[in-house]
Amino acid sequence: MDGSASSTTTLQQPGPNIIRLQQGITRTVKPATSGEKSFKEIPVLDVSRMYSEDLAEREKLAVEVRDAATKVGFMQIKNHGVPQEAIDAAFDHVKEFFALPLDAKMKLTQHQNPHFLGYEPLYETNVGGLKRGDCKESFSFAYDPDDDPSGGKDMPAIIRRVSQWPEPSVVPGYREALVKYQQSLLALARRFIRIFALALNLPEDHFDKMVTHPLAGVRTLHYPPMTGSDDQEIGLGAHTDIEFFTIIVQTINKHPALEVLNADGEWIKLYPQFGCFVVNLSDMMMRMTNDIFLSTVHRVINRGETDRYSIPFFFGANANELIEVLPSCTSEENPPKYEGMTTYDHSNARLRIARYQHPNAKQAQVFLPKKYVVRKGVPVFPEEQ
Ligand SMILES: [Fe+2]
């Protein structure tokens, strides 16, 4: 796989080797003199073996997943079993939706939904703290047990998140195509997390009971070519994802837009391959594995001349599941770094921080680490007050 590094990161660096993101997450960057090697490209894994009836084959795949999870935090997966027709149908409808006039899309604004679901216009978020913000528009919808072929066993009604959809006449077939895509990804994610269990030296079915009604939301994204300068805008500023892992499909443009930060502080371009999904591990996975599996910083920059579309699927445990550090990831020398936290609390805290313009955003303050305060809905760090 071809990969290359762009400029060294210019994120805020409160310490010599610490990078702090706008969302309050920190990551360590190695000193250049450490002599250790960082990844320079994103591995491509053939995951057809997860459907093998031979446990030895599944275990071989788990070894490769563990290697990618501990060294990179990102991978591309091929032969994943999701039909290309489902992907194509989803993209066709996503493009049709974003081509609607702004006022038609704003009828579904996230501001009228307490769960951050619906439409977000350009520059609604500002993950990088720039003058304009993130040059992207999106549409998000949540997991619905009625759409889950398994019925979403034991899901309490109180944690159900209700999505908003355009009228069928506005974009015919939109909801059906996207829900069908979500169902395909749900099946894939439930299968793939069994490989993660093996990769963590756990019984293969360890996570099964934790994902009976999981967080499995989908966000469709449109990144138009950027026109502003680097200090004005970015496609999506440097961040980490929230749940266990994200599965992304994206249009293949001439200029790759997704970039991944390695431990040397270099941005590695991800060149999407046709037929592959990108999988990136997210913060709840890193937290649960006591930082053994990496949730790696990434960003999107569309400096090409064509529109980029992507559809991330965010997979986490049941919202009411208490996630604690796995005993298999701790030792006397490496005790648990985190207390248990429910998926719901973790997810909501993070969503509110990013969506500081949302009417619910003020509640972010109660979740933020003590060293931060919120001013005008934006996290502010002590030295910037
Ligand atoms: Fe992301």
Image (cartoon, grey):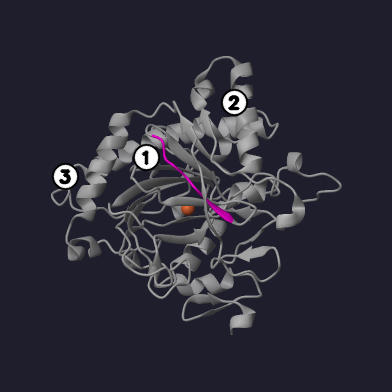
User: Circle 1 sits in a helix, a strand or a loop, which is it?
Assistant: helix
Say whether residue 111 is magenta.
Answer: no
Residue matched to label 1: 182
Residue 374 percent coordinates (x, y): 54, 78
Q: Nearer the viewer, mark 1 or mark 2?
A: 2
Could you tell me which residue is drawn at 75 percent across and 39 percent down? 328
Residue 198 percent coordinates (x, y): 65, 29
**Disc 2 from disc 3: Cα separation:** 40 Å
**Disc 1 from disc 3: Cα separation:** 17 Å
Tell me: 245 left or right of 68: left
Residue matched to label 3: 172
Q: Is residue 202 above or below residue 178?
A: above
Could you tell me the amino acid type at mark 3? Answer: Pro
Q: Which badge, 2 or 3, is on the more N-terminal residue? A: 2
Crowd tier of the residue under label 1, counting other residues whose Cα lies within 10 Å: few below 14, some 14–19, many 20 or above: many
Query: Magenta segment, which residues?
Result: 266-273
